[in-house]
Every structure is written in C-alpha cells, then in structure tokens.
C-alpha cells in the first residue's frame, strides 16, 4: 500500500488552487481545505498541476545499446521531466519485432518503477522493410502493443505500408511512420537550404518528408486505417496534415520540442548536438509547426528522446549520430515556445503532452484529468522558475542535449506515478519509495 499524500495549493492546469489527496494509488479528493489522518502533507502552493506527461516517441536503447541508455536510466529521465509513461521505440538489438522482445521491455519498465513503459512494435522484421513483423502476436502479447513503427527507417515500400495499415485495423492499432524518402536523403546532413549550401553539407530536402506523408495519407484513406506521422518538421508537412484532416482521413501527427524552437542556423558551428533526424529546419518551418500545434492540426508533442554516448557526438559533423535527448527539457521548451508566446495555455499543454498521446497510443490509466477517482498520475511544475539548462538537469546515461547552457523557463518539482512519488522537490526518489 502506498502512503497517503496531500498536496496543498496546487493550481490545476494553471487555474484555481486546490488540494489534491492521493490514497491507494488514486486521487481520492480534489478541493479546498482537505485533510486526511496520517497523510504526508506537501506544500504545492502556486505550482501548476498537470496530468502525468506521456511521450509517444522515446528511445530507451535496451536491449542491446545499454551504453547509450537503459530502461531504468531512461525512465528516471522521464520522471525528472514530469513523464509518467513513455512509448519505447523498437530500434533495439534484437529489434522489438516479436512478442518476446516487447514483453521483455514491458518487464524492464515494471521493474524500474519510474514510469509506465509501453513498447512500440516494429512494422517489419528487423526494421528492414522487407516483410511484416509479428504484428498480431505483439498485439495479443502481455505488452498489448497498439503502436507499430520502423522509426529510424521509413516503411518505404508502398505495398508493405498498405498491408501494415490493413493488418492493424483488426485490433485498433496505428502505424507510426518515419517519413523520410531514403533515395531523396542519401548522404543528407542538414536541411537543404542556405545554411547547408554555405557549410558545404549535403542537403536534406523538405520534399523527402512531405512526399512520404502525402503517399501515406492516401494509403490510409484508401484502407480506412489509422496513420500517425512521427516528428513532422516542415511547413509543407503541416499543410498536408491539415488537408488530410479536412478530408476525414484518420491521421494524427507529432512535433518534437526541438522543431518548435531550434533552427538550422545552429549548425553553423558544426556542433553535432544539433544534428538530428529529421534535421532542424528554417525559422519559417518553426513558425508553421507552432501554428499547426496551436490550431490542432498537429495533435501532440513527442520528444524523440535519442541518447548517444559522447563519442558518437564528439566528432566531425558528417560522422556524428543523429539524435538529441529530450525528456528532461520537453516541458520547459514547450513552455518557452508555446505558452510564453501565447499560443497554448496549460489546458492545451495537458492535451498535447498527456491526454492526446495516451489516446493515440491506446494507453489506459494515463492522460486522465486530475479529478477524484482517477489514477494518481500527475506532475507539479514551477512555471515561475527560470534557469540555465545544465548537465545536472540530465538523469539518463547520455548528455547529447541541444539545450545545455541555454536559459529555459520552469522546473518540474514533483512527479507522482501509480500514487507514489518518483520526483520529490526536484530530486529523483529512490526505487524503494514505491514499496
């Protein structure tokens, strides 16, 4: 049995202050002047209370790449960022393309205890794009997989993509596409434009993303199945999703925090922390994806948390790995890019970072409102804080963050998962805190 917790004076979704009483893993009561015998009382005066954040796009690297991240270290990073659930991408070794591997990932998450780990299954065997993986077996496994992706690789064959879309209809699944035409991006290093030309780096054209999105929208419409577009990054992609939704296609899309804030101008110093797939785009693209998130064209924010060991980034640009860590910084970046600019309020943040990703991923018990009777999955955020993002803010095994040394607003102070504290006043709780 977990301890009773009484948080006093939290601002639910940034609005009116209220007390939150947690008992037996659930929110027992929300109101003013609450009391409970034996409850631990926590001063949450003025802190913004948000439903536990849910990340639909996390790379936890285990099994196979534990030098970069493990399920334990990755979920500790998640808890530090206010996340109570993460969806683990399948590019592990072995690839998560079978019931056995996804059940192993689920068990590792349960043992770690810092956040729910929901495995994502590969679309194709070994993510090689040649034949469908065991989609049905993963769906009926204990991991209950409902999201399938070859992320890191595009499902480039239209026939295989069509078959995958058809297959997952039977159990309400969704195909999450990494939209990147491999022929149009051979050797690509940076967004195709003025900066790539000046730096002499091979360009990564926007059409390589947009052409796959357009194709898959038509396939999803033809099949009548669900499509999710991973890490959308261009103005043209926003317009394609907007067009598809007007047509009634069952398509959803995500944008990363870094594509909401950073541009290809940051590559001028050849700092490989800014090398990512898809690449950082132009300021025009940044403004377009912000607008798309604000008006509901883009459904969610997902981190694409991609840890790498230092040697994979401390090298020349062309040899460096793509990817950025992002779990600890995500809420703070969204705060800066979307809340401080007036494009979203805290209710909107709860939608794009909690309820909508849980809904898209069919993850029960997460993304629920902070009301009596709901699972105790929430975070408390100091929206008035400001500070320089530093390595001490990172709690995973890798430090390839593009925000190191940058001023970011806010700070996550408390995270509650399954009714127990995983982050306490900004400090990660020990594993025994949940027992």
Image (cartoon, rainbow, N blue to C red):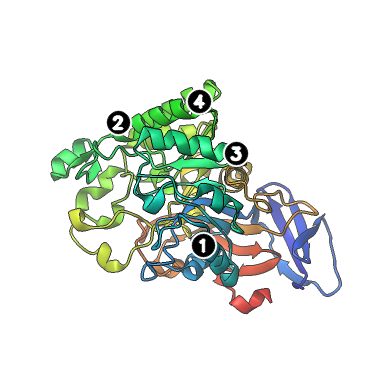
Question: Where does the image place residue 276, in percent across and percent down from the top left?
Answer: 32, 50
C-alpha separation, residue under disc 2 versus residue under disc 4: 21 Å
Residue linked to disc 4: 221
Mark 4 or mark 1, earlier in chain: 1
* Residue 33 placement (x, y as % from top left): 84, 60
Q: Which residue is mark 3?
A: 170
- Contact? badges 4 and 3 (CB < 8 Å): no
What is the C-alpha distance between the residues marked 4 and 1? 32 Å
Q: Are marks 4 and 1 in contact (CB under 8 Å)?
A: no
Residue farthest to the top, as pictured: 247
Q: Tell which circle, 4 or 3, labels the residue nearer the N-terminal end.
A: 3
Say which label, 2 or 3, has the lower sequence index. Answer: 3
Distance from disc 4 to disc 3, alpha carbons, whole Å, reads: 16 Å
Pick the front one: 20 or 8: 20
Label 1 sits on residue: 100
Residue at (32%, 67%) from the top-left corner?
309
């Amino acid at each position: 049995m977990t301890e009773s917790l009484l948080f006093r004076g939290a601002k639910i979704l940034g609005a009116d202050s209220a007390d939150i009483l947690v008992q037996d893993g659930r929110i027992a009561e929300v109101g003013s002047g609450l009391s409970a015998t034996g409850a631990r009382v926590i001063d949450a005066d003025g802190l913004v209370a948000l439903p536990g954040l849910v990340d639909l796009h996390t790379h936890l690297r285990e099994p196979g790449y534990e030098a970069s991240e493990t399920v334990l270290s990755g979920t500790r990073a998640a808890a530090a960022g206010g996340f109570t659930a993460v969806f683990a991408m399948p590019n592990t070794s072995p690839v998560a393309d079978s019931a056995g591997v996804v059940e192993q990932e689920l068990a590792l998450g349960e043992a770690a205890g810092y956040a729910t780990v929901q495995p994502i299954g590969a679309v194709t065997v070994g993510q090689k794009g040649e034949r469908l993986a065991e989609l049905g077996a993963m769906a009926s496994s204990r991991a209950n997989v409902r999201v399938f992706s070859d992320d890191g690789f595009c499902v480039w064959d239209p026939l295989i993509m069509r078959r995958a879309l058809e297959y997952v209809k039977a159990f309400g699944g969704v195909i999450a596409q990494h939209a990147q035409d491999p022929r149009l991006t051979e050797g690509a290093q940076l967004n195709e434009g003025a900066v790539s030309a000046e730096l002499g780096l091979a360009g990564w054209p926007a059409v390589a993303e947009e052409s796959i999105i357009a194709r898959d929208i038509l396939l999803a419409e033809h099949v009548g199945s669900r499509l999710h577009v991973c890490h959308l990054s261009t103005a043209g992609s926003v317009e394609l999703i907007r067009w598809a939704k007007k047509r009634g296609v069952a398509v959803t899309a995500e944008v990363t925090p870094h594509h909401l804030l950073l541009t290809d101008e940051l590559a001028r110093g050849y700092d490989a922390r800014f090398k990512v797939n898809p690449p950082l785009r132009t300021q025009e693209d940044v403004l377009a994806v912000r607008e798309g998130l604000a008006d509901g064209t883009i459904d969610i924010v997902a981190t694409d948390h991609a840890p790498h060991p230092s040697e994979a980034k401390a090298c020349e640009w062309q040899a460096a790995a793509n990817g950025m860590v992002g779990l600890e910084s995500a809420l703070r970046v969204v705060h800066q890019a979307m809340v401080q600019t007036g494009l979203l309020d805290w209710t909107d943040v709860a939608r794009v970072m909690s309820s909508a990703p849980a809904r898209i991923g069919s993850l029960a018990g997460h993304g629920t409102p902070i009301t009596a009777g709901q699972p105790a999955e929430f975070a408390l955020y100091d929206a008035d804080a400001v500070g320089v993002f530093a390595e001490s803010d990172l709690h995973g095994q890798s430090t390839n963050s593009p925000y190191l040394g940058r001023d970011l607003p806010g700070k996550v102070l408390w995270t509650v998962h399954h009714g127990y504290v995983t982050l306490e006043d900004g400090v990660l709780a020990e594993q025994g805190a949940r027992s």
